[in-house]
Image (cartoon, grey):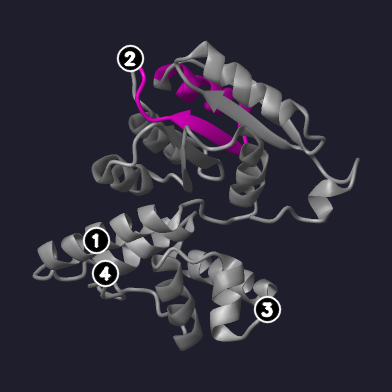
Amino acid sequence: MTQSDEARVPGRGEPIHVLIVDDHALIRRSLELALAAEADIEVVGEASDGQEAVELADRLLPDVVLMDVRMPRQGGIDATRQIKASVPSTRIIMLTVSDEEEDLFEAIKAGATGYLLKDVQIDEVPDAVRGVHEGQSLINPAMAAKLITEFANMSRKEAERPPQLPVPRLTDREMEVLRLVAKGMNNREIAKQLFISENTVKNHVRNILDKLQLHSRMEAVVYAVRERMLEIT
């Protein structure tokens, strides 16, 4: 994942406001230290459970939330669902020790933009924050493969369900981009595959999300499979 040149320019633009949510104080501290060293990122709050995270998100309006999946009182997936309902612009990265398919799929359905395993190198976290803030999905190829399996299962289960509302029409190029997003490709990989620039890919993704009235790439894939715009086998 690449850092934007603009993010590296001191004093240019507002910093990315981050809320850290984990029930382990040591993990929260490690994440805070990793992010505090970055001039373009500011940790605006910390929470130790999902309920506290929802309350802080409503008050602080963070750009990005680093959200633990499993916590006491209220877990990260339920908290993600509530935060996305009240602060739709917030991007949420799930933190977990597990890549269980069920957790992964539920997190994406809840509105998470990325999924980060806790064994990730700590110096990779700032780039992860920048990436989702810029509209990228954060998911590795192994997780993408699991998502595709879940999408295929969902598509089969809902094969008999008639569409409830007219589905927004995407252009042929937008559908090409969406299919590659569903394969777990990032903007650079999609650009190379389609022989177009990364900026053009970003524009296509933005248009897709605008037409579907969604907030993340993976939400768009879930929607497209559910409405039978995409068939994943």
Residue 135: name its quadrant. Answer: bottom right
User: Is residue 100 something that shows in the picture?
Assistant: yes
- Three-letter amino acid code at the position of disc 1: Thr
Q: Secondary structure at mark 1?
A: helix
Q: Which mark is residue 35?
A: none
Task: Give the magenta part as a residue range.
Answer: 51-72
From the viewer's perspective, is residue 205 above or below residue 4? below
At x 54%, y 74%, the residue is 190
Distance Cα–Cα, label 2 vs label 3: 46 Å
Distance Cα–Cα, label 1 vs label 3: 29 Å
From the viewer's perspective, is residue 20 above or below residue 132? above
Distance Cα–Cα, label 4 vs label 2: 35 Å
Q: Which mark is residue 197?
A: 3
From the viewer's perspective, is residue 42 above or below residue 210? above
Residue 2: name its quadrant. Answer: bottom right
Label 1 crowding class (10 Å Cα cut-off): few <14, some 14-19, many 20+? some
List x then y, in percent, for residue 67: 47, 31
Q: Secondary structure at mark 3?
A: loop
Q: Which mark is residue 227?
A: 4
As rendered, which of 99 and 121 lies closer to the eye?
A: 121
Circle 2 residue: 73
At x 43%, y 80%, the residue is 175
Which quadrant does the C terminus fall into? bottom left
- Three-letter amino acid code at the position of disc 2: Arg
Q: Secondary structure at mark 2?
A: loop
As rendered, which of 105 and 165 lies closer to the eye?
A: 105
Q: Nearer the viewer, mark 2 or mark 3?
A: 3
User: Is residue 43 something that shows in the picture?
Assistant: no
- N-term mark: 1 or 3: 1
Q: Nearer the viewer, mark 4 or mark 3?
A: 3
Q: Nearer the viewer, mark 4 or mark 1?
A: 1
